[in-house]
Image: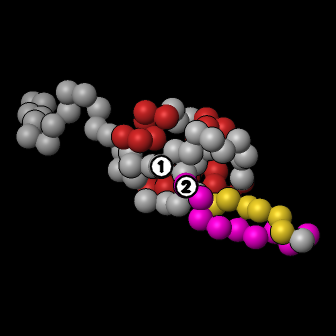
Amino acid sequence: MTDAVVAKKILGVMRFRRGRGFSLSELKECGLTIPDARKKGLRVDKLRRTKHEENIKALKAWLESQPKPKPEGSTTDQVEEPLK
């Protein structure tokens, strides 16, 4: 699982820390809803309103690395007969 990053500016210096979860705008940018994200095991922070590009890139990379769901009706047990 990937972690969200939150930026905070202290005395003119940007500091990054691990966040509680992904913001709603970051999930929306990647095409996920809150229930979908939670089913995939991602944490969601409803209170955070910021959108960080680092989080969006990490989330898209994580989604691409996940196995794709099989189409309905396809099983590995089905064997096609060769045409004669």
Q: Is residue 26 visible?
A: no
Q: Are marks 2 and 1 in contact (CB under 8 Å)?
A: yes
Q: Nearer the viewer, residue 39 or 75?
A: 39
Give the position of the C terminus as an image quadrant: top left
As measured in the structure, the alpha-carbon distance from the residue carrying label 2 to the one carrying label 1 is: 7 Å
Query: Where does the image place residue 30, in percent across and percent down from the top left?
Result: 59, 41
Query: Where does the image place residue 47, in percent across and percent down from the top left?
Result: 63, 41
Residue 80 drawn above or below residue 13: above
> Label 1 belongs to which residue?
43
Q: Amino acid at mark 2?
A: Arg
Q: Residue at x 51, y 32 (%)?
A: 33
Q: Residue at x 36, y 40 (%)?
A: 39
- Magenta range is 12-20
Query: Where does the image place residue 18, in percent across and percent down from the top left?
Result: 59, 65
Is residue 19 located in the magenta-colored stretch of the structure? yes
Q: Amino acid at mark 1?
A: Arg
> Label 2 belongs to which residue?
20
Q: How is the image coloured?
A: secondary structure
The numbered mark at residue 53 is: none
> Which quadrant holds residue 68?
top left
Query: Where does the image place residue 35, in percent across and percent down from the top left?
Result: 43, 33
Q: Residues within 10 Å of mark 1 (few under 14, many from 20)?
A: some
Q: Is residue 77 visible?
A: yes
Q: Nearer the viewer, residue 38 or 53?
A: 38
